[in-house]
Image (tube, rainbow, N blue to C red):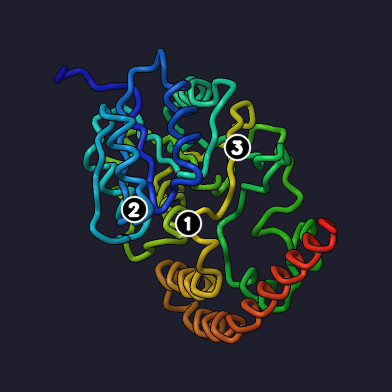
Amino acid sequence: MSDARPDISAVIISYNGMKFLPDCLRTLTDELKGISHELIVVDNGSHDGSADFIEANYPDARLIRNGRNLGFARAVNQGFEEGRGEYYYILNQDLRFGHGATGKLLERIKQEDSLGMIGPKFVYFDGGTQRSVRSFPTYKHVLYRALFLDRIFPDHPRFGSWRMGYFDHEREALVDQPMGAVMLIPRRVVDKIGMMDERFPILFNDVDFCRRLAEAGYGRLYFPDAVVEHYVGASTSTMPVRIRIISHTSMYRYMRKYARPIEFPLLWLCGALLMVSIPISIAVNQTRRTLTALAASFSRR
């Protein structure tokens, strides 16, 4: 093995992803041609043959087989520990690459040493733009969410300020948090701020990582010249009730981590609001899924 570091350590986190992995790996490896790289796949205990598929079809990839689902944060950290590249390319499995997105991200982040992360524009598989940029959540955002104000007024500069419904996804901008489905991160940055906090195993690990980047003075850049197709929710859509509970508890854990003692009364109030809103959120989500299924059924008639 050469002592020279590759430019990119591409780390894919896999979990029961056979619906997506063939396209993801095919398009990614096409994009990585001409870029010095290594490919690492961390499989979180898949039982659909994902790991066997990778082993059979991508023998040059380093495959880490976890015996069970250790969560996204732990899997990413395994990639950090295993990777040798100057940049870590942390990737979900439900992606399709094209149009030189990887090369564009790499070229752009190399232009500014102050950048700690860069993320692309995401589009759905049908080509529609995804809202993929958020601000750091605060106590007021919990209140807006509990009162459904962010859903009623998603583009409002105050009520929609967490999910940033008003953000122009066609312009490059420094933001709080680009979506964590694709993250290109310099090795030197991880060496400085550390790996992902495994107290956030599935959700909010990317939010916390971006918060730590911000506190260390590193910028997080949304870069729409690079476009990646993203299915959204390949690993979480099979457990909608559980993921709602995890989402609310992870948000509370995130806010507790950064709360100052003077903010504890607000923190406890937000915790209560988050817990009370769990069954409401589950009911709303299940109703939406039912109505969507009914609409699809009628449209096929």
In the displayed structure, does residue 297 sit left or right of residue 80? right
How many marks can you see?
3
Element at badge 2?
A: loop
Q: Is residue 23 shown above or below 296?
A: above
- Which x, y percent locates residue 68? 27, 61
Q: Nearer the viewer, residue 109 or 130?
A: 130
Element at badge 1?
A: loop
Q: Nearer the viewer, residue 41 or 256?
A: 41
- Which x, y percent locates residue 69? 32, 60
Query: Gap between marks 1 and 3, in whole Å?
Result: 16 Å
Query: Gap between marks 2 and 1, in whole Å?
Result: 19 Å
Question: Which residue has dot 3 on it?
Answer: 229
Question: Which residue has dot 2 on it?
Answer: 196
Q: Nearer the viewer, residue 226 or 26?
A: 26
Pair 2/1: label in front: 1
Q: Residue at x 47, y 75 (%)?
A: 249
- Inspect the image, locate mark 3, and give the three-letter code of the amino acid beneath it: Glu
